[in-house]
Amino acid sequence: MTKRADGPVGPDTLRQGAVRLLAGGNPQIAKADGDAPVQAYIAAMPGWKRDVGQRLDELISQAVPGVHKAVRWNSPMYGIKGQGWFASFHVFTSYVKVTFFKGTSLRPVPPGGTAKEARWIDVPEGAFDEAQLVDWIEQAAAIPGWGNS
């Protein structure tokens, strides 16, 4: 591992070149499909946010076996092949935002957002309700998602 001002970066990230952190510490990762770009994104997340990203990825991968992963718009995306994207997350200065693209269809509806269908939760430093998050992940993966995965 190589140490950067914002934390360690793994060898896969280094092969792609230095990862630039955008506003709020969000890693700039090129659009790509698969687990590798998602792991590069997570490895480049600064500080405590990396732990949140790792845990979110673990929870999604466990709750949805065979989940399709990609990076789009500098965010890890999770979907079902042929059914669309159901969730993503994005780094901000004081939290990690987890978005459910068809969030208004989930029960209870996640608290953040005013978009037509998308809803989200902001995960600050510290613990979050993993059981509720897994419930939302399972619900979201069971309905048609957004766009093409």
Image (cartoon, rainbow, N blue to C red):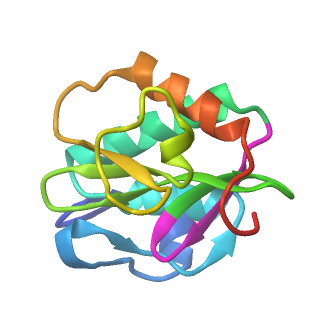
Comparing 69 with 133, the one in front is 133
Q: Is residue 23 above or below residue 132?
A: below
Look at 30% across and 68% down and name the residue there. 26
In which quadrant of the rendered image does the N terminus lie?
bottom left
User: In the image, is 88 to the left or to the right of 8?
Assistant: right
Q: Is residue 33 above or below residue 73?
A: above
When asked about the image quadrant of residue 131, the answer is: top left
Look at 46% across and 62% down and name the residue there. 116
- Residue 89 placement (x, y as % from top left): 43, 54
- Residue 15 placement (x, y as % from top left): 56, 76
Magenta segment boundaries in residue numbering: 66-75
Look at 17% across and 30% down and name the residue there. 126
Look at 80% across and 54% down and name the residue there. 83
Comparing 41 with 9, the one in front is 41
Q: Is residue 9 visible?
A: no
User: In the image, is 66 to the left or to the right of 13?
Assistant: right
- Residue 111 placement (x, y as % from top left): 29, 40
In which quadrant of the rendered image does the C terminus lie?
bottom right
Q: Is residue 114 visible?
A: yes
When asked about the image quadrant of residue 81, the answer is: bottom right
When asked about the image quadrant of residue 37, the answer is: bottom right
Q: Is residue 101 above or below residue 14?
A: above
Comparing 126 with 119, the one in front is 119
Query: Which residue is situated farthest in the left direction here?
Result: 94
Comparing 117 with 90, the one in front is 117
